[in-house]
Amino acid sequence: MFRLSRRGFLSVGGFGMLSLPNILQAQQQNGTQHKAVINIFLGGGPPHQDMWDIKTDAPAEIRGEFQPIDTSVPGIQIGESFPKIASMMDKFVAIRSVIGSAGGHDGYQCMSGWGRNEKIVGVGYPSIGSVASKIQGPVDVSVPATIGLAAKTKHSPWSESGSEGYLGISHRPFKPNGEMMSDLTLNGITKDRLQSRKELLTGLGNIKPEGDVFIDEAFDVLTSSKLVDALDLSQEDPKIRERYGDGKPFKYQYDGAPTVNEHVLMARRLVEVGVRSVSLSYGRWDSHGANFDLVRDHGGKLDQCVSALVEDLDERGMLDDVTVVVWGEFGRTPKINKGAGRDHWPQVSCALLAGGGMKLGQTIGETNRLGEHAVERPVHFQEITSTIYYNLGIDPRDTTVIDTGGRPQYLLDHRDPMTELV
């Protein structure tokens, strides 16, 4: 005799990992303001000394072609490719002394705080979004807690959306641009047939009345248009779309991500409907050649969409609740090579943050005159990750989650959020 489990009823559209506790948790939270993070990964390793840390006193073979420009915060200067961000620097913080890079040419560390080769019980560590999914659950059952927008890249680690690690597949970031797109549909099952299954399930006799509510919520996942609508930019105000831009033409992409400004706008729309963590991969910053041409192109486009995002969040009253982080896997060499490029430099890198209720309008840390290493306030990757967790309402100092071996694990080794920011 063929048996269809209750779990099977909840798997029709591909959101097969919904459980009654998840539904209850989301039901309790639905309609409340939530904290979120938009994680913008600059795949390939952005050049810190050509962005937020211009080395005016360095010799020509190190200094590069860019001039520093003043910002809205007296005493703070950043690279000339970012005039829009400079004009609203009071809403940003630039960290110029990021250390602890694992050296991997991927987004794993920016998504989780851990290097890809760091394992626990033979499994990798979970991403920020996966942890939020596990601990906080969905805000709305019709919207995944964590979404990865990264477009597929020829060098696949640059399309990193984060891993569920030891938390299990139910907390894997949802990728609407990939194979999980089918999860947004009923997979060939009509709404009438779905309704029939629902009636059969609720008529089994041993489901308590409160269980009916959970079933209603679960079926909302398959019939709601919230997620699909959030991904549909044609529904956005044309003036807002123009403010963000589209990042085209896509130049210097090669085996990396395009400069998809529209993904940045999409991230804001997803947060609005209840997503806790949105990650995306922006551009291809592996500038072994033509570094300055690449930064002019990528930097100008990034300047437009990130300034638009922060302005947009602020206008909507969301900025204090949404943490924006812009960073890459490592920095680039101080010395310019023969091809006018900069090579890999894991010794130090940079990050730009906004929102999250943080203390903004400042820079943190310094590198030496040549941009080789941090000489003032080195900031570990995990300190930034810890701060993001804190902003999400997850205290990394005492929070643990259970690994596949049944043991509690702290989220990070460096568990204290940055006191300069929180």
Image (cartoon, rainbow, N blue to C red):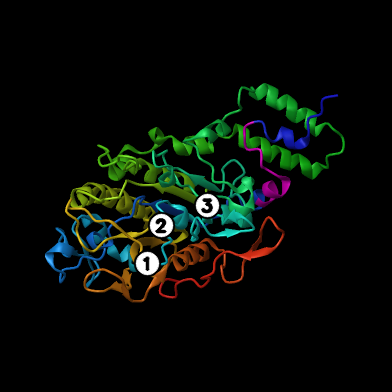
Amino acid type at mark 2: Val
Task: Please give the residue where the numbered disc 3 appears in the rendered image.
Answer: 276
| Alpha carbon distance from label 2 to label 3 | 12 Å
Q: Inspect the magenta stretch and tell me whether residue 251 lies in it.
A: no
Point out the tag, 2 or 3, that comes first from the N-terminus: 3
Point out the tag, 1 or 3, that comes first from the N-terminus: 1
Amino acid type at mark 3: Arg
Q: Indicate the secondary structure of the residue bearing disc 2.
A: strand
Which residues make up the magenta segment? 13-25
* Residue found 36% across the figure and 59% down from its top: 330
* Residue found 74% across the figure and 27% down from its top: 197
Q: Position of residue 346 (x, y in %)?
A: 36, 62
In-front residue for pair 374/415: 374
Q: Inspect the magenta stretch and tell me whether residue 22 lies in it.
A: yes
Q: Position of residue 61 (x, y in %)?
A: 15, 63
Quarter of the rendering occupied by the N terminus: top right
Q: Are marks 2 and 1 in contact (CB under 8 Å)?
A: no
Amino acid type at mark 1: Val
* Residue found 70% across the figure and 37% down from its top: 216
Corner quadrant of residue 46: bottom left
Q: Is residue 170 visible?
A: yes
Point out the tag, 2 or 1, that comes first from the N-terminus: 1
Q: Nearer the viewer, mark 1 or mark 3?
A: 1
